[in-house]
Image: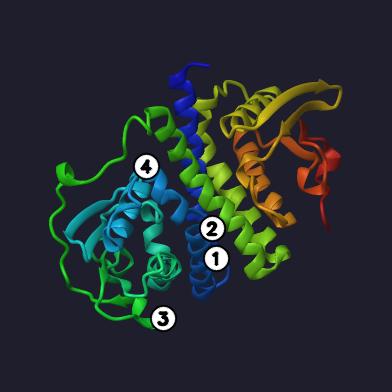
């Protein structure tokens, strides 16, 4: 495989998991309620913060900066690497801005119209209000000055170090109307290209989207229970899989609508996520085995609902690939098997029995 093809596939994987993240928010708003979506985003971003924030400061080369500047530069660099449109503006060692201009990455396209402001506030409470706590600086807070979900000019605000310790309620405040300074791309920071060559940046871009999905799969089970999380995640996966298949299939060389064609797609998707996959033909169809689950690597006590949701992506993709095929799950690593195993075969009349 050429480097160009691999990079194309990484971008396709990032696009797919990006779609799942946005789709899950909309699923919660439409099939549950606004409060469920807001609580889910709080838990997702708090978990992401706890897992990623402090370890990334050293990797990004910003650990020695003043806390307000460090926090703002983290959000600028990590999101820019992830493919997010973002701006950073330094004002002083005690005050530094970030702005996410339209179009917002997380509320992709017209999905913005279906996301209540409370959901965006859950994101801010989960991560931005926690930066000072994680840095051991009780004087550091975040002031949100604009939100795209309020039909303002995107999400903007600044990290500010006060001259007194903050209460929990003061770590995040809202000040609509304050205008951020103009963004100067030339003055904006960037990572050391020796430590961050193009290949690492592209892989980090893929991982950015995968990390959100991984966290959602874990936190949704904790918040809603595994049965409800499995339902919500699976229907999201099915919808996103069928909607996104056509836009990502070329990256994986899909040329035919046979079982063998989808097996090649599924194996290529696995490989692009760093999971070794193999294809085996048997008399009942085509078998795909995936060794490893890169998406959930490092997570302990993975709920069974995580697989149900994740597998929904491939069920949805198959329905777009060829609605007359069936995807059967034969083995599951979350059940203790050594690998995942699926069979792709032609649908038989007995697979769909009419209900009277």
Give the mark, 4 or 1, whose residue is nearer the N terminus.
1
- Kindly identify which residue carries mark 4: 81
Q: In which quarter of the view is residue 301 placed?
A: bottom right
Q: Which residue appears at 57% of the width and 42% of the height?
A: 242
Q: Position of residue 40 (x, y in %)?
A: 54, 67
**According to the image, label 1 marks what residue?**
28
Q: Secondary structure at mark 3?
A: helix
Earlier in the chain: of badge 3 and badge 4, it is 4
Q: Which residue is mark 3?
A: 168
| Tags 2 and 1 touching, CB below 8 Å | yes
Q: Quadrant of residue 285?
A: top right
**How far apart are labels 4 and 1 at the CA level?**
28 Å
Q: Are marks 3 and 1 in contact (CB under 8 Å)?
A: no
Distance between mark 3 and mark 1 Cα atoms:
27 Å
Instruction: Say which residue appears at 38% left-offset and 83% top-offset.
Output: 167
Q: Nearer the viewer, residue 135 or 294?
A: 135
- CA distance separating discs 3 and 2: 28 Å
Crowdedness of circle 2 by 10 Å Cα count: few (<14), some, many (20+)? many
Horizontal side of 348 relative to 16 (left or right) equals right
Per the model, the C-alpha gap separating discs 3 and 4 is 30 Å
């Amino acid at each position: 495989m050429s480097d160009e093809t691999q990079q194309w596939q990484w971008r396709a994987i990032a696009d797919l998991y990006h779609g799942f993240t946005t789709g899950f928010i909309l699923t919660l708003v439409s099939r549950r309620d606004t409060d469920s979506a807001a609580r889910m985003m709080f838990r997702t971003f708090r978990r992401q913060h706890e897992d990623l924030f402090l370890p990334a400061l050293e990797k990004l080369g910003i650990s020695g900066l003043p806390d307000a500047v460090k926090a703002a530069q983290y959000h600028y660099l990590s999101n820019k690497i992830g493919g997010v449109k973002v701006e950073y503006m330094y004002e002083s060692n005690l005050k530094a801005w970030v702005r996410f201009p339209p179009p917002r990455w997380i509320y992709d396209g017209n999905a913005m119209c279906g996301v209540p402001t409370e959901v965006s506030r859950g994101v801010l409470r989960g991560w931005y209000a926690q930066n000072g706590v994680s840095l051991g600086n009780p004087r550091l807070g975040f002031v949100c000055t604009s939100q795209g979900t309020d039909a303002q000019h995107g999400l903007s605000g600044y990290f500010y170090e006060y001259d007194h310790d903050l209460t929990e309620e003061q770590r995040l405040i809202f000040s609509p109307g304050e205008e951020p300074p103009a963004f100067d791309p030339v003055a904006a920071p960037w990572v050391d290209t020796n430590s961050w060559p193009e290949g690492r940046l592209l892989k980090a871009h893929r991982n950015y989207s995968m990390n959100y999905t991984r966290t959602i799969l874990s936190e949704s089970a904790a918040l809603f229970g595994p049965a409800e999380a499995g339902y919500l995640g699976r229907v999201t996966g099915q919808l996103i899989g069928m909607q996104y298949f056509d836009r990502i299939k070329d990256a994986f060389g899909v040329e035919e609508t046979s079982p063998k064609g989808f097996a090649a797609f599924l194996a290529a998707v696995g490989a692009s996520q760093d999971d070794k996959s193999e294809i085996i033909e048997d008399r009942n169809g085509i078998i795909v085995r995936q060794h490893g689950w890169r998406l959930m690597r490092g997570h302990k006590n993975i709920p069974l609902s995580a697989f149900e949701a994740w597998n929904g992506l491939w069920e949805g993709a198959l329905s777009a690939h060829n609605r007359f095929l069936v995807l059967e799950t034969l083995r599951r690593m979350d059940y203790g098997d050594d690998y995942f195993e699926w069979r792709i075969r032609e649908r038989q009349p007995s697979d769909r029995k009419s209900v009277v």
